[in-house]
Amino acid sequence: MLIVKLRPSMQSPPSGQELQLNGQGEEQPNFDPEKDAARIETAIKTKGVDEQTITDVLTKRTYNQRREIAFAYERRAKKDMISALKGALSGSLETVILGLMKSTAQYDASEIKASIKGLGTDEESLIEIVCSRSNAELMEIKRVYKELFKKDLEKDVCGDTSGDFAKLLLALVEAKRAEPSSVIDYQKIDEDARALFEAGVKRKGTDVKCWISIMSERSVPHLQKVFERYKSYSPYDMQESIRKEVKGDLEMSFLTLVQCFENRQLYFANRLQDAMKSKGAKEKVLTRIMVSRCEVDLKKIRQEFKAHHGKSLYQTIAEHTKGDYQRALLNLCGGDD
């Protein structure tokens, strides 16, 4: 059971990420962890469990505030709050609340672990996390993964995947991506664009190794310019080229990378829309994106969602979910755009 949650080494989001709570970016004013802990203790003890209070307290606080509540709860109740919540809640709501009790990096690390343990791999989850996270995020995930599971993320990812797909994931997890530079190297942009074309569309078969090295080692602003330049060599843009050249998990991985290089928040907005296309919702995807991005870039994701899907994320969640689970997600979403 994974409850190594409340040590001082648990860190707030890596620098460079704006802290955003409920899409607003503010910590709860007049925050009183003792009072919150008392409310949660009462809610858990109530006959039938008062899920609404638990939801409202924990989804309207930042991760650091939730930690303080957990410390206060432990002092009061003489037991671990996460274990108590686990016993009191169930289903989708439990998944959201327990997810929120982890830091962003701990949550991502746990989701990766869940996607590769047991029989068969949940490639979709693995691809979404590994291919959409920045260098800084991946380095923090690796550190936390080792701390939580006493294993190297690289080894686990490699042990569970194969072929070019494994090579791409490994190259990304190694986090060797160059940092953005203030100097724009037009020659390098041209060389990379031509190399991507010659390794793919121009020849029979695909030199995947070349694609992997360029897409895992170059900085994001550089790659954005490379994809623009690429169009002057290839009759297809980068995403179309990927669809023509590779298939399966590799195709999905490269597409995720390119979509995130071009606009990471739009990638998440589209994933959310896709998760809520049919009558219900793909709760796994919905929960993971809402929990993992709520203190990172959810406000921008909301803006992209509204701009591209003509309806607010808030309204869409309201239509496709119900009960306490809906309440939790709407609280995380913050506002209606």
Image: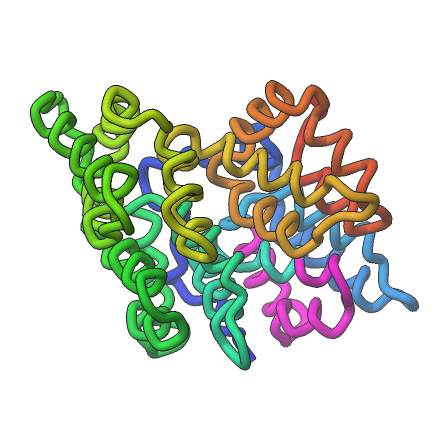
Q: Would residue 91 be seen by someone viewing this image from the given angle?
A: yes
- Apparent side of residue 160 relative to residue 97 in the rendered image (left or right): left
Q: Which residues are magenta?
A: 66-95
User: Considering only vertical position in the picture, is 297 above or below 206?
Assistant: above
User: Considering only vertical position in the picture, is 89 above or below 293?
Assistant: below
- Apparent side of residue 128 relative to residue 198 in the rendered image (left or right): right
- Apparent side of residue 288 relative to residue 7 in the rendered image (left or right): right
- Apparent side of residue 142 relative to residue 32 in the rendered image (left or right): left
Residue 80 belongs to the span the image colors magenta: yes
Q: Residue at x 41, y 35 (%)?
A: 239
User: Considering only vertical position in the picture, is 275 above or below 169?
Assistant: above
Q: Residue at x 75, y 38 (%)?
A: 317
Of the pair 2 and 265, the residue shown nearer to us: 265
Q: Would residue 183 be seen by someone viewing this image from the given angle?
A: no
Q: Residue at x 67, y 61 (%)?
A: 95
* Helix, strand or loop for the magenta stretch, by majority: helix
